[in-house]
Every structure is written in structure tokens, then in C-alpha cells.
Amino acid sequence: MLSGREEMEATALRKRGWSISAIARHLGRDRKTVRAYLSGERSAGGRRRSAPDAFEAFIPYLTARFADDRHVWASALYDEVVALGFPLSYQSFTRGLRTHGLRPHCEACSTVKGRATIDIVHPPAQEIQWDWDELPEAPWGGDAHLLLGTLPFSGKTRGCFADAEDQAHLVEAIDGVLRRLGGTAKEWRFDRMATVVDPATGVVRDSFVPVAKHYSASVVACPPRRGNRKGAVEKGVHFATERFWRTMRAKTMAGAQEAFDRFCAGVGDRRTRPLARLVEVLGSEARAQAHLAERGRSRPTVADLAAFEPLLALPAVAYPATKAKTAIVDHACLVAFEGNRYGVPPGLVGAEVTVRHRLSSDAVEVVTPSGVVVASHRRHTPGAGYVVREADHRAALEREVLSSFTADPPCRKKANRPPGEAARKEARRLLSRHEDKEVVVTLSAYERVVAATAHSGGERR
């Protein structure tokens, strides 16, 4: 290894015409070392590795992953390569990404401009910020709708998948998020969400007022065109999309919900936060340091701060909103609802019905357009793929299906089937209509046409 001064002197001597051997004798260094520095293979201050680079074995995998998604987060890739046996730290991993230039350039995103921001002070358990995360190309078909609720003081985030974003599905998702958070804050902050407030005035809708009262919370709307006022949940949306959704492997909505719950309780709650947040709730830096020392950490995590948020208790049951969906009865006398299929009586195949579920109950009802309830079932776990039938409906359907069976063999497709006696008789009748008419051929009409043409002095063609 050459020092900076030695490399400078070797370069100067080489330009004067000295040979590499002469320079090596002058510096007291090996000729191969001098040649490597003069050729640019090595540089001053850099030490050659004595062991192979552990990062290089993962370059083909990382190249393929960046070909799949150039915006995938480094922390998500680090989790993947650790599972594949990567032995180094996260810092070494990101240094390898930069050194080898693996992340491709995205011209479309390079023009995004920043803007001034400031952190808003949020007392513990003061508010929950809500927002929908609309995720395209869900593995189970269509788009996924993930409602996220974030406690801005600690950053604790939980989410709940829903089939749609109407008010009934919103209420169900809110209750699911609150159960996962373990309580509710005093205020709920939304942007101008049309199912919650009037987008023009920001006034809470009459249909949503009982929902907020049920959970003892007040609703606060962000100012117009100021969705970033709820920046904590906006960051939660970004984190959930880039860190979880891009690499998720679940194929059903139920599987995605289980995976996201694990992700929030694991990766999400282990994120570090500034020490000042913990000092704020404990009253002194010494107490905060002692609290962290007991847990073997130097900085608090989301879970540490969330433990000091005094959330309000939740009601025993969800607000009794009613979810409804229009569906067509299929040929098996089943209708689809929440990823399961529920049976109806025979005779309704192809009919349009409404499937509804009241959140405070455990029942799913199938209703005709005239308002008649034709079936009622116990609601099963959404997305689990259950087929639910009543015993009498199954028996009636079996009787109808079995009664339509026949013992006759199927028709032969290639048999010879010439016209039968009845067809030949009808053919003779059709032909007999022409037998009584005599066909008379005369040229008098043609002669008259020829004469008229000649008299006009022209020939028609």
C-alpha cells in the first residue's frame, strides 16, 4: 500500500521517464504494487480486501429485483437478502448498493421538487389521523382498499383492508383499526373525505355523527387542499405501500390482512423515534435514558412511545352500520360476499339480490328486490373462501338437480340420418305446386322490344 505522498512521487518520476523497477527501488516498494497504483487499479488510502466481498454474491439477485421494481426500498431488500444468508449489516448493504450503482435511474421521478415542512406538535393520544391507501393490482383481483389509522405522537399505525370505500365499509374498517390500536384518541382527523364530511364546507355529515358519538370521538377536517396537514398518516401510507405492499406475497385479502398485522407489530413498531419524544412523556432525560437502558436500547421505538399514549376505551361492539352489496345468483344457487359464497333457495338462479350485513350482528342476509329475506346465514371470516348453505336449501337443490337427470344415452354425433318419410312427403307436396303449371315459350315479346329499339335509331347494350 502506498501513501498519498508516495503515489504522488511515483507519478512524477514516471512522467520523467523512470522505469517501474527504478521507482520501486527508489521507494522501497514491490514492483507490482507500484504498477497497480500507476495504472489506476489501486488508489492511495485504499486497502485491498483480504477476504472476498460478501456483497458480490447477491448482485445478480439485487439486479433482478431492481428490474422488477426500481423503487423498492433498501430496507425491504435487506430483509430479503438476510433471509438468503447475507451476513453483513444494513449499513454495509446500502454502501454496496451505492458502490456498485445497482439502483437504476428514474427520469420521471427525478424532477420532483421539495417544499418547506415543519413538525406539528401532537400530545399523546390527542388525535388519530385517517386515510385510505388505494393499492392497484391486488392479487385477488381489482384494487385493494386499505384504511390506515396513525397516532402521530408515537407513529403507531394499524390498517384494515376493505372491499370498498363507502361509509359502511369505512365504519367497519375504522372499528377494525381501533381494535388493533387498542383504543381511540380524542379526535379523528380526516381530509375532505366525502363519506365523513362535506368536501365543500368541511362540516361532518349527519350520517357520520352517530358513528363518532358511538366511539366518543370528535371529527376534525383538514383545511381545503391541505391534505398534508395529516402528515403522519400520509407517511404511514407511503411506508405501507413501499415497505409492505410492493413485496407482499399473499394471494387473498384475508392473507394480506394477516401479513399486514404482523408487519405493523414487527417492522412498524420497531422503528426508532427521537429521544426527545420519550423525554416529553417521562419528564427528564435521565429517566428516559434509564427506561431505555432497561430495554437495551439507546433510542426509543414506536412501541416504546405507544405504551405511554392513554387511549380511550372502545365500546363492546362496532357501530351498527349495514353493509350491502348487489349480486347475481349463480348456477349453484350461491351469491358472493366478502370473499365467501352463501346459498339461496333453488329457483333464483340468475336473479339479482342484495346481500347485507349489520356490523353489530353475526348474520348475513340475502334479500330480493321486493324486500323479502330469502336466506340468512352466520357470517364467516371475510376472504376465507367458505361455501355456506342451509341444510334444507341443499336438499331442495339436490332434488331439483337429480330430477333433471335422464337415463337416455347421449346422441351420436356422426350417425347417418337421411330425410325420413314425413320429410319426403312434405318435399313431394312442395314440388307438386309446380306440376299443374305449363311453361309456354314465345318470342313475340322479344320481337316487339327489338322493333322498338331499331325504330329509335340506337342499339342498347
Image: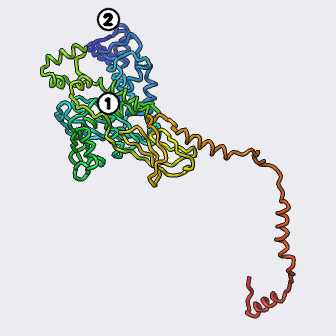
Measure how far apart labels 1 and 2 are at the Cα level. 70 Å
Q: Name the residue under label 1.
A: 180
Q: Name the residue under label 2.
A: 28
The amino acid type, in three-letter code, at marker 2 is Gly
Q: Quadrant of the C terminus?
A: bottom right
Q: Give x and y (percent) for residue 255.
A: 44, 31
Of the two numbered discs 1 and 2 in the rendering, the one whose residue sits closer to the viewer: 1
Q: Give x and y (percent) for residue 207.
A: 28, 49
**Which dot marks residue 122?**
none
Horizontal side of 44 relative to 447 (left or right) equals left
Residue lying at 32% horizontally and 18% vertically, measured from the top left? 15
Outermost residue toward the bottom in this view: 455
The amino acid type, in three-letter code, at marker 1 is Arg
Outermost residue toward the front in this view: 392
Residue lying at 41% horizontally and 46% vertically, measured from the top left? 324
Rendered image quadrant of residue 296: top left
Considering the numbered disc 2 on the image, is that residue within a helix, a strand or a loop?
Answer: loop
Q: Tell me the crowding category of disc 1: few under 14, some 14 to 19, or many 20 or more residues within 10 angstroms, Cα based.
A: some
Q: Nearer the viewer, residue 334 or 251?
A: 334
Rendered image quadrant of residue 52: top left
